[in-house]
Image (tube, rainbow, N blue to C red):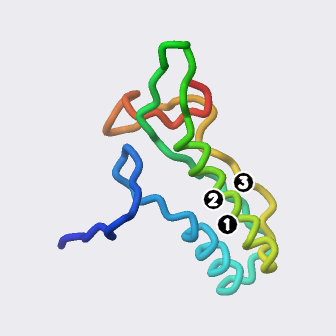
Amino acid sequence: LSSVKPSGAEYTEMDWEIYPPGIYEILKRVHNDYDAPVIYITENGVAFPDKIDKNGRVNDESRIEYLKGHFLQAHRAIEDGVKLSGYFVWSLLDNFEWAYGYSKRFGLIF
């Protein structure tokens, strides 16, 4: 079994493809296939190699763009009739990733 990465795609530090339209596609599919009364996204986040710059700040543009893209697609799904009632970003703080320990930064707060 092998996989092929799409050319030109962006990836997270976990080597997961970044594809915001995917959240729209799955929301629409669940809505259509299961006639879900409401849907909650209980975990959506991303790990990037955040670093503190010389001014003590974290330039987190990649995470901001990731979330913005996914929020826009979730909003698009709502406009198309999906009853999305909650969206929880993963995660407020960094967490222990089973295979990576604390080396992958998912937290909104550094």
Percent of width and height locating residue 68:
66, 53
Q: Secondary structure at mark 1?
A: helix
Judge from the rendering whether residue 30 lies leftward or rightward of residue 4; answer left or right: right
In the rendered view, does 106 fall on the left or right side of 24? left
The local crowd at label 2, few if under 14, some if 14 to 19, many if 20 or more residues have their Cα within 10 Å, is: many
The residue drawn where x is 74% and y is 71% is 76
From what the image shows, is residue 12 above or below residue 100?
Answer: below
- Residue under the image location 56 percent in, 43 percent down: 63
Residue in view at x 49 percent, y 31 percent:
95
Q: Quadrant of the N terminus?
A: bottom left
Q: Mark 2 = which residue?
A: 70
Q: Which residue bears the numbered disc 3?
A: 87
The amino acid type found where label 3 is placed reads: Tyr
Determine contact: label 2, label 1, CB under 8 Å: yes
Which quarter shows the C terminus? top right
Disc assigned to residue 73: 1
Residue type beneath disc 2: His
Along the horizontal axis of the image, is 16 left or right of 60?
left
Q: Position of residue 87 (x, y in %)?
A: 72, 54
- CA gap between label 2 and label 3 equals 10 Å
Q: Nearer the viewer, mark 2 or mark 3?
A: 2
Quarter occupied by residue 104: top left
11 shown above or below 1: above
Residue occupying the far front of the picture: 54
